[in-house]
Image (cartoon, rainbow, N blue to C red):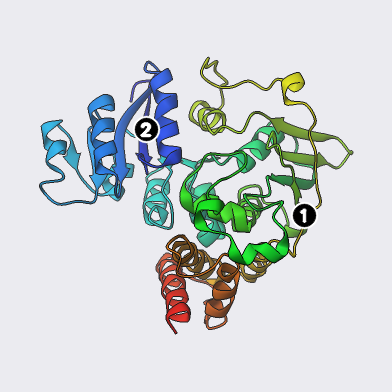
Amino acid sequence: MGDNVKGLAILGSTGSIGTQTLDVVRAFPDDLRVVALAARRSLELLEKQVEEFRPRLVSCHGTSEEKAFLASNGCVDCSMDEIVRDPEVDLVVTATAGDVALGPTFTAINAGRDIALANKETVVMAGAMVTSRAREMGVQLLPLDSEPNAIWQCIRGEDKKISRLMITASGGAFRDTPLEKLADVSPEQALKHPTWSMGAKITVDSATMMNKAFEVIEARWLFDVPWEDIEVVVHPQSIIHSMVDFVDGSVKAQLSPPDMHLPIQYALFYPNRVYNENIRRFNPTETGTLTFEEFDHERYPCFSQALDYAKRGGTWPAALSGADDTAVELFLTKKIGFLEIAKVIREALARHHNIEDPSLQDIVAAGEWGRNQVRKVVEG
């Protein structure tokens, strides 16, 4: 791309993060250009995105008839690996759910493309591998997720003398639900997040706090901070997204209304900050009191369980990620109850045979094993 225009490839363009990324692109047509879009489903929305942003490359699932709109709009149908290697792509936005972007992310890194990373599973499943390879290739991993993005902003310009990272958590849809009633909560209730508007999978993960465990794993690898120096605190207002406590006792925090447009924009324009009239501003007098609560491990068994598997290394984190995918899917389709999510993951992973020094293929296979094993546990 030209010096003043950044070429984007957006993997997962029809999801929550993908559509909000396109909102930012829409606000800066002279600075950002969509070179490629990728989506697995939601072809009707993808067609509208293609018509508006006119990407040259598109990757999607569907029949020849369903993909007919691509040719009619002058697009080339190709794989995500072909997309991320394209010379016009300056930045790859990984906004997919699950591990579908894992392979293309490594392809992009090997091609020298910077990554705006919203896909947690990439770092959860292959944190050591992906961060090591990015360093080797001189590639930047730019976190889009609000919590690691906040940490990234707080440590910018610092000398990395960090005492601890404090990741905030809203507490999810059931933070105030009596423990004895959690067995009976419904998927519809779980999807009513108190402060954020997100996709179904991540909203359920927020209710179980699996999502927060994944963010601790992200922080461990993205910022090279020991496990024991990463804490989680419940912050119901979701205004402070993370805090960094430095060795001298100074604490820096990043504050903003719960809206993903700001962290997305920060990553797309890094290292510059730009004004966008569409982004909500923090108003302390309107916001009022900010409160914090101690993390309740009894309420969120998925959290401690997930970190235990993650700290084991090898293929454990990949198996965990896959198992969670299926467990959440089964809860959303009312095959299991809310409290059974942690139980079926634990029962499935009890059968896992770890590979200590896995290849990328081993990691992908472990994720698939985790998905299948949870289904076997539930089906008996």
Query: For the residue carrying disc 1, how many other residues have a C-alpha within 10 Å: few (<14), some (14-19), or many (20+)?
Result: some
Residue flagged by tag 1: what amino acid is it? Phe
Q: CA distance from mark 1 to mark 2?
A: 38 Å
Please name the amino acid that badge 2 sits on.
Answer: Leu
Tell me residue 209's x, y (percent).
Answer: 63, 56
Q: Is residue 306 above or below residue 352?
A: above
User: Which residue shows up at 56% across the image and 55% down it?
Assistant: 205
Pinpoint residue 195: horizontal percent, then vertical percent: 62, 38
Check disc 2 and report its element: helix, strand or loop: strand
Q: Name the residue nearer the viewer: 54 or 229.
A: 54
| In this view, 145 is above or below 29 | below
Residue 357: % across, % down: 53, 72
Q: Residue at x 43, y 56 (%)?
A: 98
Residue 8: assigned label: 2
Which residue is depicted at the point 48% across and 53% down? 201
Q: Residue furthest right?
A: 248
Relative to residue 106, is residue 242 drawn left or right? right
Q: Residue at x 57, y 71 (%)?
A: 340
Q: In which quarter of the view is residue 335 placed?
A: bottom left
**Front in this rendered view, residue 21 or 328:** 328
Relative side of 371 to 185, left or right: left
Label drawn at residue 90: none
